[in-house]
Amino acid sequence: MSNSIPLLTILGVLPLAFALIAFVVRGKAGKQLALVGSLVTLAVGVWAFFAAGSGDLSELVPWIPQIGAWYALSLDGMGRAMVLLTVILVPIVLGAEWTLDQKKAEAHAEPRWGGNVFGALALLVEGFALFVFMSADVLLFYIFFEATLIPMFFLITGWGGAKRGRAAMKFLLFSLAGGLVMLFAVIGVYGITAGAGQPSFLIDDFASIPMSETVQKVLFAGFFIAFAVKAPMVPVHTWLPDTAEQALPGATALLVGILDKIGTFGMIRICLGMLPGASLWATPFVVVLAVISIIYGAVLAITSTNLLRLVAYTSVSHFGFMVLGIFAFTTTAMSGSIFYMLAHGFSSAALFLAVGFLLNRRGSVEIADFGGVQQLAPLLAGVFLISGLATLGLPGTANFVGEFSIMTGSWQRQTAAVVIAVLGTVLAAVYVLWAYQRVFTGQPTDAVKQSVTSDLGGREKLVIGPLIALLLLFGFYPQPMINVVEQTASTTMNVVGMTDPLPGSMGGK
Amino acid sequence: MLEEFLPAAPVLLVLLGGTIAIVFEGAVPRLVRPTVQAAWALLVLIGAFGWTLVNWSANAPQLAAMNALTLDGPSQLTWMLLLFFGALAVLLFAERRVGGGESPFAPNASAVPSSQAEREAIAARQEQTEVFPLLLFSLAGMMVFAAANDLLTMFVALEVLSFPLYVLCGMARRRRLLSQEASLKYFLLGALSSAIFLYGVALTFGYAGSFHFRDIDLAVQSNAQSPWLLLAGLALLGVGVLFKMGAVPFHNWVPDVYQGAPTPVTAFMAICTKLAATVGLLRLLYVALGSLRWDWQTALAVIAVATMVVGSLIGLTQTDVKRLLAYSSIAHAGFILVGVVGAVTTANGLADDRVGSVAAILVYLAAYGLATMGAFAIVTLVRRSGAEATSFAAWSGLGRRDPLLGVLMTIFLLSMAGIPLTGGFIGKVAVFAAAWNGGYSWLVLIAVIASLVTAGFYFHVIWVMFGPNPNDETALVSPGIGTQIVIWVGVVGTLLLGVLPGPLLDIAINSAGFIR
């Protein structure tokens, strides 16, 4: 509370304010204002990222004292990483979808609203997501968790394929189902703290309150189901491929890159941080689900005939890795998981945007409609390949650092799971390289020649360049960021009451 | 004598206002009568609101009118809410611009539809300005019902609030047969439920030997007689009140009446009747029958589950906005009952500064009222060849044609769905928390699942408004000043309650204590 300017509030409110302006200002000016808003937020976000490293930025104001709800914001290591991811991705997505109001692709129906509305909705998503990542109060977390659904629903409804209405509804109902189950758990938090004397929704207050094992398990289930839908994990993942196929690639990049991270974020912050006992109890079950997600997602990615569905399934597989790392209960695996959340945000966004560039040219993302694009658009092919290689975890990219830490960190506690999960990385090579082969290599057909007439333009280079640079930067020089996220991992390990297993050479298992 | 009735002055003011309004019918020239009546009704309601506010801020709960009325926190707050929403309803009643200069009510309600008499009434530009005194009388009945301290007063109030509503329901200007059918249905079922209520009053009197809540409570506690008489009385009383609330299985009238009645009347009924009935139920169950809690809690929990399930599931299949809002109102009755079942009050160990069942339900009703009032106000704006068009087909693409209106309606629907940052969310959290604290966490789980189903149909409407291409046959009329006020009060209230619920929660907590 020592800080004089409420930096975190400013960071969260900025994009929301710009969103309102962009809604009102129609046409090109609104679009530009939205971009300016996202860039200002980027600057403030980077400032907050560094400021949170050197001092305490937390804010604590009573909000609804009658029920113990606080306007409590704070920024720990994991929050810093997620804030950085959010503020970087939004301007990139806005740039990538800059021409969405002129799009005439056959696969995509005519746009409903102007570019300014897209910018405004994206900024709403950004503002709400930032608040989620900064919340230190469960009710506040829940409120913004649910609030993100509304602009995302309209982002899917407004632009994209012909069946986007169904897709938006499916996305919404899955998320709301998870969210309302979570509401049950949130009310449980109130019930328990009120029963213990003083109602409070503060996350830090909760773990120390004694409660029966059954209650803890019920609450854990409530929270975990919501996060599993969000993440998404098998078997509640089916909304993601459908949504990705219909929505604009830029919107999907926001969804998968930022919003889905709330799932894994919440598992660490709320499941482990508030209900450590139940988290340990559920570990075998969760790990099995995670491994199934890894393999099942990868297999479905291989069999996908649509590039957007393919990328969506790779994400299902990768979220499996993150969950495995979280529930391995070692500092290495958990910080690997958080690092992977960041890396996956960049790599999946790069891949979705690259597919978006293909879509804008060809008007389709069916793999069968492509072939030999590399000869016509070598730069685009290169971008796809690099993002794909990052996705499959090639050493030198950020994803490798995350995936490798998860594997090594989980080895001692979850050996069998790691052995199976390694298969996932092999399958990853298949889906990425096979897709690359079918789309980019060989001789271009006439249809491809007619539609793919240009390589990446200046705007496209400008938006995809930073993503690839970041993937390589964090791949070759991961240590500073690992130090940042390790703080959250070790704090959470303390709450759970687990210590790292000794390495084998020192007498460990 | 005077000091006995002075605290109940707001009710008397409303009754007096209604009586004077009837005099206006004969005394004021026809041309200015609609304006005068509307202004008078508003004036009366504002005056009564101010008086209630003064009484409430004196914070001296007392019995009045020779112990027939209790002027405690819940009744004062309910009065303020009733008068507030009643005033908004008057604005909708008086709206003429959306009807192309015509009032929403039939020019001559007693003329047979499509008859010569009706054509003449239309040609003569007749108007039934009696709707304003009817509203005032009904409102006075609701106020008494919410504050009644004995069963007989409660019954009289029930009738006073019902009869004007029966008449109002049959007075729609368009689709008059539908409206009259609604009126008749409401009247027959309402009369039946009143009779059942009266039977319950008789049985309870037989058990306790008194109509007063206090004496009933004492009789229950002393456990003097066989409980069967009492339980039967309790069940019959419950039927009467639950009918007015629109709870399953006494809900069958709701969709037809809501659809057939003129939309301003529907809005008035959906909010104010529910408000009065809910507070009456609370008083009955918590004050008179509080010691029987273990008996009625389970039964009421079953009714709550049935109400939520029926309201939400059948709501899914609706293709008409007004009917959908009717089923939504049934589902809301279910959510309110969830809070009633919790029965967390200061009488059984709630700390003074916490949100208990009564405070939670009052906040819920306020949030529900704001969103419902606004939603029905928007319903009056969507028209096809002059008449309201409420089918989904007519509503398709509305938000794309008028984004502002679409966004406003979306906010109301989000609030009803209980999405955060709207008042509906705060209401839901408060009510569910009350049920959880009362030991009914399983009921909360079911309520949460029902919320998901209701969200399904609210978002269906949102999709209808923003998804398909606009329907060209539908006209969006521009609202007059009254309707605009209603919509904006609804939106600002809904968002304010969602973001900064502290003040209202404080008021509700301070007004949650029943006296008897």
Image (cartoon, rainbow, N blue to C red):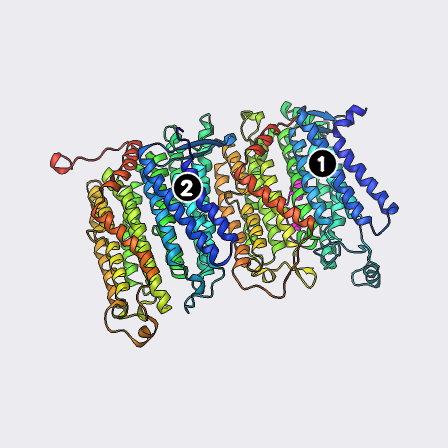
Considering every residue shown, the one lying at the far bottom of the view is A446
**A155 relative to B506 in the view: left or right:** left
How crowded pointer 1 is (Cα within 10 Å; few <14, some 14-19, many 20+) is rated as many
* Image quadrant in which you'd find residue B125: bottom right
Relative height, residue A369 to residue A501 (above, below): below
- Disc 2 is placed on an element classified as helix
Q: Please, which chain is the residue tagged with disc 1 on?
A: B
Mark count: 2
Contact, CB < 8 Å: mark 1 with mark 2? no
In the visual, does A151 lie left or right of A320?
right
Q: Position of residue B196 (x, y in %)?
A: 71, 41
Residue that sits furthest to the left in the current view: A505
At a point 26% along the width and 58% down the height, the residue shown is: A388
Evaluate whether residue B516 shows in this view: no
Q: For residue B96: magenta? A: no
In the picture of the structure, the residue carrying the numbered disc 1 is B143
**Is disc 2 on the same chain as disc 1?**
no
Mark 1 residue element: helix
* The C terminus of chain A - image quarter: top left
Q: Which residues are magenta?
A: B239-255
Q: Position of residue B378 (x, y in %)?
A: 63, 52
Up-down: is A490 above or below A444? above
Q: Which residue is mark 2?
A: A11
Amino acid tagged 1: Met
Q: Amino acid at mark 2?
A: Leu
Decide which of B91, B19 is in the foreground and name it.
Answer: B91
For the point 35% across and 49% down, the residue is A88
**Quarter of the figure with residue A50:** top left
